[in-house]
Each structure stands twice: as C-alpha cells, then as structure tokens.
Image (tube, rainbow, N blue to C red):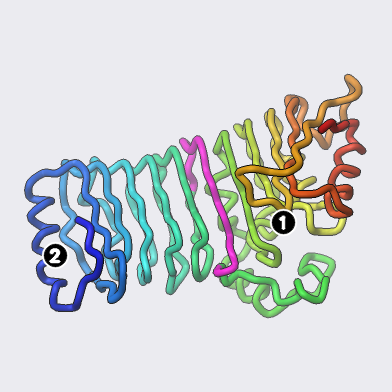
Amino acid sequence: MIFDECSDDDEVYVKLWTRFAVMSKVHALTLHIQAPPYLWFDVLPLVSRHLRTLDLEGLCVQLSFLDFAGCPALEDLKMNLRDISVEKILSRSLKHLSITKCCFDCQLHVSTPGLVSLKLDDLTGTTPFLENMALLETAYVYLGDSCEDFCLNYDSGVYCGPSNITCEKCDLFNENCGSVLVLLGGISSAKHLKLISEFGKFIFSRDLKYCPTFSKLKTLLLNEYWCEAPGLDPLACILKNSPVLEKLTLQLFSKGPNHKVEMKGSFSSMERSSAIPEHLNIVEVKCTVVDERILKVLKFLCAFDIRFSF
C-alpha cells in the first residue's frame, strides 16, 4: 500500500487495510506514506506466521511496534521512518535489515542474531546499539551529518581520547555506554564491510579503542574519515585487527560511483609488516584529485611496501 499523503482521519482505514492484508496471509507487505502528515502508529497489528518481507516508509512508530516475536517467518525488513520512539528491534528470524534516514528519539538496540545483511544509512539521532550478529555476511554503515554523536573538540583540532581531555558529548556517551562496543562489536563477524562517516563523529574511533577483532573480514571499504586522525590511527587499527583481509578500498573525498582518479596498489617485496594482514593482496585508492590529503594516505601505505599505479 502506497499513499501519496494521508490525513489523521485516514489512520483508522490504514490500520484496517493492514490488518486485512495480514489476515489474508500475505508473504510481503509494503506500507509507504510518501508525504506529510505522517501517521503515528503505536501498535500495528503485525502478528503473522506467513509474513516474510516488510517494507515501511513515512511512518512514526512507538511502544512495542518493533518487537517482531509475532512474525516468526519474517526475514526481510526495510524501514525509512520519520520518528522512532522505541528502544529495541527484536527478531530471531530476520536475515536482512535496512534502516535508512530514520529519526531516533532514543538509542535503539538491535537484537537480530540471525542477520545476514545490514544497512544503516544516514540516521538522525543517537547511533543504534548493535548486539552480536554472528552470522552476518555484509554490512553498510554511514554516519551522516544528522548523527548526534559528534565530538565537540573536533573543530578545534583536538581529538578526544585517552591522552586528551574529553568533551562533554564524548564524556556523556562513555558514561552511558561504559566500555561496551556500540557498532563495531555487533558487525565484527562480517565478511564484507563498508564503513563511512562524516568528520567529527566519534563512534567508530571510540569503538576501535576497545580493539574489536574482525576475524572473518575479507573486503573492506572506508572513506576519508578513517584517515583524518594524526598517524591515521583508525585506519592502522582496523587493518591490524583484520587478520584475513584480502581487499581494501579507500574512497577518499569522492562520493562516486564514478571517480576521476583510481589507483591500485601492489606489494613491492615478499616481506610485509605485521601491521598489514598477510592475505591482503588488493589495495585501491579512489579520489577526485591527488592532493596533500591523498599523498598523506599514500605515504602511510608506502611505508608497508605498497606501491601504486594509475
């Protein structure tokens, strides 16, 4: 069901139509509200042993809506929601989860132990907390400008960390979460990762301080965020903790999909540093222009006997 717009008076009918679809034992349900006013749904009648795919857009949800215990066959969930006032997504059957441009009023906990693919794209509010996803194959995470986990010291060029005074936002986040991994712990079992963040967001760098190991990771795509800190610490750390990594792609200051400059790296000797995964044989750098920022990254990689050609 796709609605160009939906008034408050229409809410009762939308719920009735949704209930009818569920009672008709549909395997796939789409519910899109494409323009305001968007509807607040507290408890949508989603209890079905037949529902496998659920696609939601333009809704505002709260309370127990995202507890899918009543949908034991649900495998594919896509959400592009305007406002989420729930604390947890809970599903043991879910295999594919995509959350795009959602706005969170509180920190969301995602408990989906059977997940195979995950997409978190340009979310508003606090970064979701991901519980262990041992079966995860692929994950895409983009922390955009709307992410509220922003280091207040970033603009001054002082990075919060063990050797620096931490800002108020970093202190508050660490106080609430302690030493628990927020994002990287949940996706550390993935084989293929794309991790992208705007400057100043502290989640990835914070999680790396607790040294998660990416024991199955084969391919990794990172953007310039991972190369911004002094010494390229985030990049160095994730490489050190990815023992079976085979392919590294650095997409620097270029959104793509077409990049003006693409360079491929190769090792110039048989001996390699212990800081570089022993199985790594493909290194790509994609950018718009080779400037000082790119040269800094190339110099870092060249220190490990990686040479580049256009």
For the point 35% across and 51% down, the residue is 78
Q: Is residue 10 magenta?
A: no
Q: Amino acid at mark 2?
A: Lys
Tell me residue 47's x, y (percent): 16, 52
Q: Which residue is mark 2?
A: 15
* Tag 1 residue: 225
Name the amino acid type tagged 1: Tyr
> In terms of sequence position, does the residue under pointer 2 or pointer 1 come before the other?
2
Instruction: Kindly report the distance in space between the C-alpha atoms of the residues bearing marks 2 and 1.
Output: 43 Å
Please tell me which residue lies in front, 58 or 257: 257
Tell me the SS state at disc 2. helix
- Verify whether residue 139 appears in magenta: yes
Quadrant location of the N terminus in the rendered image: bottom left
Left or right: 13 with respect to 215? left
Residue numbers of the magenta segment = 132-146
Q: Is residue 13 left or right of residue 300?
A: left
Q: Residues within 10 Å of mark 1 (few under 14, many from 20)?
A: many
